Image (spheres, helix red, strand yellow):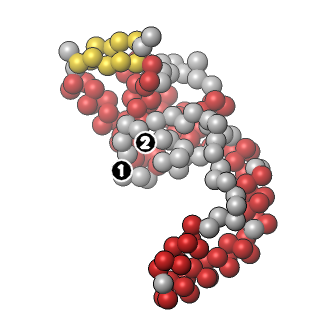
Amino acid sequence: MKTVIKISFKNLKQNYLEVQQFLQKESGEKNIYSKSKVANDLSLWGDDNYDMLEDFITKYNLDFSDFKYDKHFESEGELTISIWSILSVLLLPLFITKGILSYLLNFLSNKYSYKIDKFNFFLKEYKSDKIDLTMGDLITSKIKGKFSLREDIRFVLN
């Protein structure tokens, strides 16, 4: 069951803009929306998202004692020493060849260039099992004063 929070539109908008400006400053991204993901969309990985969260918690004096970092983000070590990193290094010559072929064929036919660009050497894209935090989660946490996921809260305008 969702927790209901009554809030004025003005207060909700103010919180939205504050968190948006905070994330723009931290990430360097300009187009940030409530569904923007901290790691995947804003490219805040490892120590970057850890430092951002620490600054966010301190700035707004929030209680994040229930927050489990491992559930939402990968640590710096998990990011650098993964099988995908090792495979990328081993397949580097193939990726370089693919780039050169794509560039050369682009002059002859966009159709074949596009097919080469999409070819991924049968590697699956890396999919994390982590629940990436969104700007909406941070707004919700700021309003509630403690860590909360947006999906667990229902805002009612008063």
Up/down of 127 relative to 73, above or below: below
If the image is split into quadrants, where does the N terminus sit?
Answer: top left
SS assignment at label 2: loop
Crowding at mark 2 (Cα within 10 Å: few <14, some 14-19, many 20+): some
Up/down of 52 relative to 115, above or below: above
Q: Quadrant of residue 84?
A: bottom right
Pointer 1 and pointer 2: residues touching (CB < 8 Å)?
A: yes
Crowding at mark 1 (Cα within 10 Å: few <14, some 14-19, many 20+): few
* Residue at x 37% of width, y 45% of height: 32
Up/down of 63 relative to 138, above or below: above
Mark drawn on residue 36: 2
Up/down of 58 relative to 76, above or below: above
Depth check, front residue: 118 or 73: 118
SS assignment at label 1: loop
* Residue at x 27% of width, y 17% of height: 156
Depth check, front residue: 85 or 46: 85
Residue 65 point in image, percent of width and height: 58, 18
Q: N-terminal of the two: label 1 or label 2?
A: 1
* Residue at x 57% of width, y 33% of height: 131
Say what amino acid the circle numbered 2 marks. Ser
If the image is split into quadrants, where does the C terminus sit?
Answer: top left
Q: Quadrant of residue 98?
A: bottom right
Confirm whether residue 70 shows in the render: yes
Residue 69 point in image, percent of width and height: 63, 30
Say what amino acid the circle numbered 1 marks. Asn
Confirm whether residue 60 shows in the render: no
For disc 1, the marked residue is 31
Residue 50 point in image, percent of width and height: 59, 38
Left or right placement of residue 92 versus residue 98 in this view: right
